Image (cartoon, helix red, strand yellow):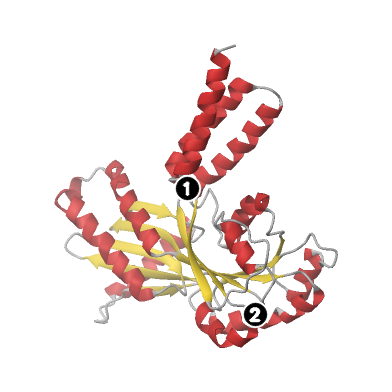
Amino acid sequence: MLRQVYILKDEKVMYNKNFGKALLKEDFNKLYHEIVELTEKGTGIELDSYDYIKYKIVLTFDEDLDLMFMFITDINDDLSQTKRELKTLKKEFIDTFGDAIENLDTSLMELLDPIIDSIHRNLKTKISLVGFSGVGKTTTTKLICASEIPSVHIPTITGKISTVKIGKLYFHLWDFAGQEQFSYLWNDFILGSDAVLIITDSTLENVEKSKFFIELIKEYAPHAHTAIIGNKQDLPSALPVEKIEEILSLKTYSMVAINQDNREKMIQIIADILEVSTDTSPLLKPLFERDQLIHQARNCLENGNIAQTADYFEKISDLCLELGDDSLYKEFSEKAKKLKGYLSNQ
């Protein structure tokens, strides 16, 4: 996952954007000086990537302009693709600002935001859903994607990859076959995952069997953020999440994936696992603001406060437009107009 973007001239940060939790300021300063020391040793080896704790630092320089361009990603991310996107950023920056670099107004740096957002989309975070057949992987996928929830289990034969937009962040969601006859595919599917969610149906038998996936992750995606989704918690046979967590020794989240009202909860789980918050990634902020406004609007409507509800609906429609959700934008915009029309006729 692309977590941070930096452009520096000497030691001055000209541009910084965060997509998720990564390096604190003091850690970044230490890293920067380590890299500078290595490059000044004159070994003749061009430094273009650097492993630091659990992150991969990918960098490129422009010596004429004394600039350093840097991406901070998860350590298992595809290095070749990351390098290509970093070169794109370098070219766009120099083409746009190269002639004025010495007297550049840093307030103009926001012109880079659309380029950086496009790069983030190209470097989509890979989230894999794993688990045996029938535990609810596809239902969970549809819940995240806000698709129609299937009422009958239809086994996923090979695997499905969906592009998911959460707020303004983009993800690849991998849901692959859980039947054991397709187990020869599991290693390849899990490679390169930024996060792996192990789905269990919360029965003791399935929880015990799911230990297999923990070992698989350790071997093929050792740096992936990993957690358990204890699905089907509405059934009498379901183990409590505390017991599942005790057995599997991994953070466990309660879930009933057939309930569409749990989408917000599922989104929050993903954000939690990937260490993404509104503080570390402003691109998620509009999503959580919208969800909060929807909750407030419902309360106002239940209390008969029509005028305040109409104002909330207008704010929600604006946020939907910002998030690129045209259907919800139209829905809440129409609701606001109807409520305002109702009030004007009173």
- Closer-to-camera residue (266/252): 266
Identify the residue at image location x=76%, y=79%. 208
Numbered disc 2: secondary structure: helix
**Relative height, residue 138 to residue 42 (above, below):** above
The kind of residue tagged 2 is: Phe
Taking the view exactly as shown, the residue that stands out farthest to the right is: 236
Residue 130 in percent (x, y) is at 61, 74
Query: Residue 213 shows which numbered tag?
Result: 2
Circle 1: element type: helix
Instruction: Give the quadrant of the C terminus.
Output: top right
Neighbourhood count class around disc 2 (C-alpha, 10 Å): few under 14, some 14–19, many 20 upward: some
Which residue is drawn at the image coordinates 60% and 37% (left, top)?
Answer: 294
Q: Identity of the amino acid at label 1?
A: Pro
The image quadrant that residue 218 belongs to is: bottom right
Q: Circle 1 is placed at which residue position?
A: 282
Specify whether 92 is left or right of 147: left
Q: Position of residue 201 (x, y in %)?
A: 74, 69
